[in-house]
Amino acid sequence: MNKLSIRELELKGKRVFVRADFNVPLADGKVADDTRIRATLPTLRLAMERGARVVVASHLGRPKGKPEEKYSLAPVAARLKELLGKPVVFASDCVGEGPVSRSRALKDGDVMLVENVRFHAEEEKNDEKFSKQLAELCDGIFVCDAFGSAHRAHASVVGITHFVKQAAAGLLMEQELKYLGQAMTNPERPFVAILGGAKVSDKIEVIENLMKIANTMLIGGAMAYTFFRAKGYTTGKSLVEEDKVDLALTLLGEARERHCPIVLPVDHVLARGLEEGAQTQITGVEGTPADWMGLDIGPKTIDLFRKEIAGAKTIVWNGPVGMFEKPAFARGTLAIAQAVADATMKGTTSIVGGGDNVAAVEQAGVAEKISHISTGGGASLEFLAGRKLPGVEALTNC
Ligand code: AMP
């Protein structure tokens, strides 16, 4: 886990290639949510203060290997300029003579953002020639701050490292590796994992891996219903992955054997439909009537989960425990957010990941209290599943 850090690099007067994750939502030609841009500011500021000539690259959206106006990083350049409070040069391509000569014109402390790396099909193919071209934008120094892209072996994340002298982690990347790495290798115990969200199938590997490491796993959200079916309960119209029911039963058994019990909800909020004003009721979980669906955990479950959370020393939370986007079904997720924040205030390390959970802790007004909010959705999940991330593996002193 000891990767070279940007803090250890000699940056003065050098062109430094920083791979950021600026894959932000846009609306009306503007950045609609700048969280990801702000997350990389400490790295950029450090590089600028140390006199680097900073060249930043990122992907945005899923253009099909060619330029597409709606995926241009131009709005990001505008927002970055506001956040940094200084000019940001914007290069309309990420490779070739144009951006290379503009990078050579940068002065110490200047910043240039290059256009979306995915405007070239070679990016996702981890193409060698393209990787080399990207490396021409720097003086042998690559810094990766794009934890959210580290599970992808792409040219600007992995390929480029073969053509530089040093490949280091940025401050955000370091932060992610520190918190997630510690939780997965040497967590302070008890370690309680909270998993929710829509599908068991997305998180099978995470469940399998966490049961080897955690002490308790709390499972809520739609995921719980596949487990309920495995236990023989009726689930009405709740979301169930029929083809994963057998697997859910196996996971329950495995978790017991590994002494990492899976704790499921004991009560839940049922609704007749998703429309506003639809009839709701709170019941036990064993017999959901045919035309009702489970959309949130109930008050007894909130208490049960709260107790587990309050006793934890390490908490990893990924996935909402209800359909929290709708106020009628948000109570459970917001209560969990509050409980995780309360535990953190008493010295517990809390790691919250996944876009929905970030929104939930913000909605609950407790984001500031969480020890670490992980910016990378897919990358966090792969990390929790115990996989090696190519973008992290590539960071060594080359
Ligand atoms: P995921 O991307 O797998 O983490 O799933 C997040 C989504 O799961 C959110 O949009 C939630 O609304 C949804 N979700 C959570 N609990 C439920 C539930 N009981 N029924 C339906 N959807 C749910």
Image: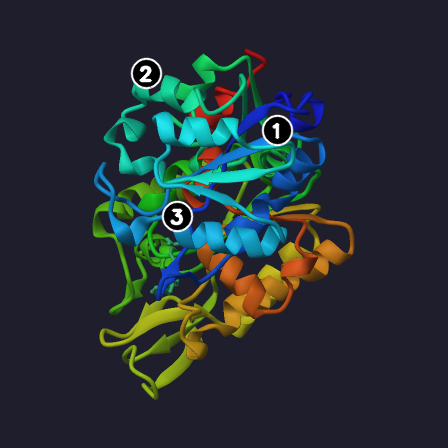
Indicate the secondary structure of the residue bearing disc 3. loop
Residue type (three-letter) at the residue carrying disc 1? Thr
Q: Earlier in the sequence, mark 2 or mark 3?
A: 3
Q: In this rendering, would 68 be left or right of 265?
A: left
Within 10 Å of disc 2 (Cα), the crowding (few <14, some 14-19, many 20+) is some
- Identify the residue shown where x is 55% and y is 12%: 165
The residue that mark 2 highlights is: 128
Q: Does the CB distance between marks 2 and 1 fall below 8 Å?
A: no
In the depicted structure, whether residue 138 falls above or below residue 274: above
**Quadrant location, the N terminus:** top right
Residue 388 in sight from this viewpoint: no
In the depicted structure, whether residue 391 falls above or below residue 87: above
Q: In this rendering, would 172 be left or right of 264?
A: right
Give the CA separation, mark 1 to mark 3: 37 Å
**Looking at the rendering, which quadrant does residue 254 occupy?**
top left
Q: How many marks?
A: 3
- Identify the residue shown where x is 37% and y is 21%: 133
- Identify the residue shown where x is 56% and y is 27%: 16
Q: Colour scheme of this structure image? A: rainbow
Residue type (three-letter) at the residue carrying disc 3? Leu
Q: Check residue 73 in the rendering and tell me which mark sits there, or answer none.
A: 3
Q: In this rendering, would 101 be left or right of 70?
A: right
The residue that mark 1 highlights is: 185
